[in-house]
């Protein structure tokens, strides 16, 4: 099966700091891939480069076999990729519903010039229906008229997912969607992501919560110092020597393998 997202030999540096060093990974249709690694390993930078929020120094990013490496973020959204951020910021003077509607960028800039008045009203009505549907699915209907900036941290993350879904993406990239979230809202996010997979939306998720990874992800890719050191199933992480080394150091990895060596 052809990859939905194909990252090829991607590199990125900030000043003298080489953050990504020839990173290659794929996300196939139907997958939820966990992107793991210690702090500073390059996870968020990989999302930023792949989604057009930072330019690549080298390599390519293909989405549905089309090269999107040099495209700006708003055009990448129209190609079928959307993302959320670790700390979503919401405008102070817009309601939850207004923020959701504003996230539909598929027709921004062309509605007033290319669409007939009747077609414009129809497109706006469809966007409104889509926004209400997403807010209902993400349990945000009771607060849809509230100021978006006044939401709790977990509700803001749910709203950021709703905004990302307004463009009807095939690939959703999320940066720590459950970090700092109340357990009840965390459960809602987990169920949402599983439901999105059933709806055909593949996902690439940066996450540190190993329980979340085992519960949600179908495959895991581990970064360490800008390079991929493991590509495995979630249940293989705890015994993978390169993963142990990335998180705990080389001595810990050697100690973890010692009983196996003795048994052999």
Image: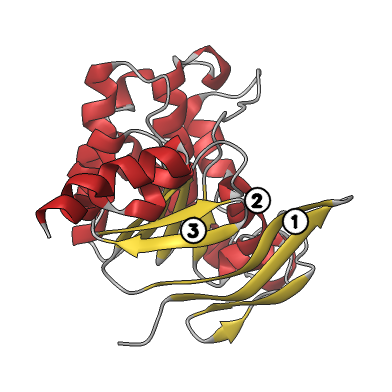
What color scheme is it?
secondary structure
Reply above or below: 68 against 17: below
Looking at the rendered image, the disc whose residue lies closer to the viewer, 3 or 2, is: 2
Q: Is residue 164 visible?
A: yes
The mark found on residue 54 in the picture is 1
Q: Is residue 238 visible?
A: no
| CA separation in Å, label 2 and label 1 | 8 Å
Q: Nearer the viewer, residue 244 or 192?
A: 244
Query: Is residue 126 rendered to the left or right of residue 184?
Result: right
Looking at the rendered image, the disc whose residue lies closer to the viewer, 2 or 1, is: 2
Q: Nearer the viewer, residue 215 or 210?
A: 210
User: Can you identify the residue that label 3 sits on?
Assistant: 167
Reply above or below: 129 against 198: above
Tell me the residue at 30%/44% (across/down).
133
Question: Which element is circle 1 on?
Answer: loop
Q: In the rendering, at what x and y percent does residue 118 appear?
A: 54, 64
User: Can you identify the residue that label 2 sits on?
Assistant: 45
| CA separation in Å, label 3 and label 1 | 21 Å
Query: Is residue 175 rendered to the left or right of residue 51?
Result: left
Q: Quadrant of the C terminus?
A: bottom left
Question: Which element is circle 3 on?
Answer: loop
Contact flag, marks 2 and 1 (Cβ < 8 Å): yes
């Amino acid at each position: 099966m052809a990859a939905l997202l194909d990252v090829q030999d991607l590199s990125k540096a900030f000043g003298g700091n080489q953050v990504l060093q020839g990173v290659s990974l794929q996300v196939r249709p139907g997958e939820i891939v966990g992107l793991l690694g210690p702090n500073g390993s390059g996870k968020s930078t990989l999302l930023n480069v792949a989604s057009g929020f930072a330019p690549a120094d080298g390599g390519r990013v293909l989405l549905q076999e089309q090269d999107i490496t040099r495209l700006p973020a708003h055009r990448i959204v129209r190609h079928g990729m959307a993302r959320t951020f670790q700390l979503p910021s919401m405008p102070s003077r817009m309601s939850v519903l207004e923020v959701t509607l504003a996230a539909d960028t598929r027709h921004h800039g062309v509605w007033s010039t290319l669409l007939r008045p009747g077609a414009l009203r129809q497109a706006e009505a469809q966007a409104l229906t889509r926004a209400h549907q997403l807010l209902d699915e993400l349990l945000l209907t009771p607060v849809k008229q509230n100021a978006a900036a006044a939401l709790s941290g977990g509700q803001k993350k749910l709203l950021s997912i709703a905004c990302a879904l307004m463009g009807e993406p095939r690939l959703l990239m999320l940066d720590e969607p459950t970090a700092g979230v109340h357990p009840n809202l965390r459960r809602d996010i987990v169920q949402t992501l599983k439901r999105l997979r059933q709806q055909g939306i593949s996902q690439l998720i940066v996450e540190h919560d190993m329980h979340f990874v085992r519960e949600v992800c179908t495959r895991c890719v581990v970064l360490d110092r800008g390079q991929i050191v493991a590509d495995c199933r979630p249940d293989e992480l705890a015994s993978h020597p390169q993963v142990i080394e990335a998180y705990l150091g080389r001595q810990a990895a050697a100690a973890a393998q010692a009983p196996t060596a003795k048994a052999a």
